[in-house]
Image (cartoon, helix red, strand yellow):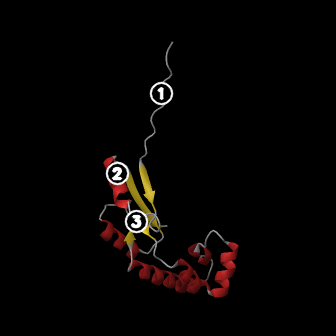
């Protein structure tokens, strides 16, 4: 009687991280950003319709190009304010060291502005796959 072949061990090949709340402590005032972009009344309406959170980039994608430019400037200003207090999440370096020791690739995907990604790289000191803005 033969024994069935053991299934091939699946191997984790890579981990893709986001920044805010995953690799960095989120210090961006998202409610303030949303209010600044939408205005108080629209913010309250959209928030009531989306209790799990507002995807501001998705919300503005159908606005006129001029409105989108204005909104994106406000968003960038809030992100730049958050940069002044950027903190790497406790345990992130250790986790990445563990992944490196197991030869598991790491990647970073974010909708943050490039300056936030650059500062993260400077403070974190770990090599990443090319950053992508989603």
Crowding at dot 3, Cα within 10 Å, few <14 / some 14-19 / many 20+, comes out as some
Marks 3 and 2: CB-CB under 8 Å? no
For mark 1, give the secondary structure. Answer: loop
- Which residue occupies 70% across, 73% down? 49
59 left or right of 73 in image: right
Q: Of the two numbered discs 3 and 2 on the same chain, state the one appearing first in sequence.
A: 3
Q: Nearer the viewer, mark 1 or mark 2?
A: 2
Residue furthest out toward the front: 90
Would you name the residue on which mark 2 appears?
98
- Which residue occupies 42% across, 68% down? 24
For mark 2, give the secondary structure. Answer: helix
Cα separation between marks 1 and 2: 27 Å
58 left or right of 45 in image: left
Give x and y (percent) for residue 59.
62, 75
Would you name the residue on which mark 3 appears?
89
Front one among 101 and 69:
101
Would you name the residue on which mark 1 appears?
6
Q: Of the two numbered discs 1 and 3 on the same chain, state the one appearing first in sequence.
A: 1
- Which residue occupies 46% across, 84% down? 77
Give x and y (percent) for residue 61.
59, 76
Give x and y (percent) for residue 31.
56, 79
Crowding at dot 1, Cα within 10 Å, few <14 / some 14-19 / many 20+, comes out as few
Q: Nearer the viewer, mark 1 or mark 3?
A: 3
């Amino acid at each position: 009687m033969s024994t069935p072949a053991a299934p091939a061990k699946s191997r984790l090949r890579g981990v893709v991280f986001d920044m805010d709340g995953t690799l960095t402590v989120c210090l961006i005032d998202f409610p303030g950003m949303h209010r600044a972009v939408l205005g108080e009344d629209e913010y309250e309406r959209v928030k009531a319709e989306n209790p799990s959170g507002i995807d501001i980039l998705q919300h503005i994608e159908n606005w006129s190009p001029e409105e989108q430019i204005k909104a994106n400037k406000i968003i960038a200003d809030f992100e730049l304010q958050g940069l002044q207090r950027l903190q790497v999440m406790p345990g992130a370096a250790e986790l990445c060291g563990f992944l490196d020791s197991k030869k598991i690739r790491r990647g970073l995907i974010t909708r943050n502005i490039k300056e936030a990604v650059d500062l993260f790289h400077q403070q974190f000191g770990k090599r990443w796959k090319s950053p992508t803005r989603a």
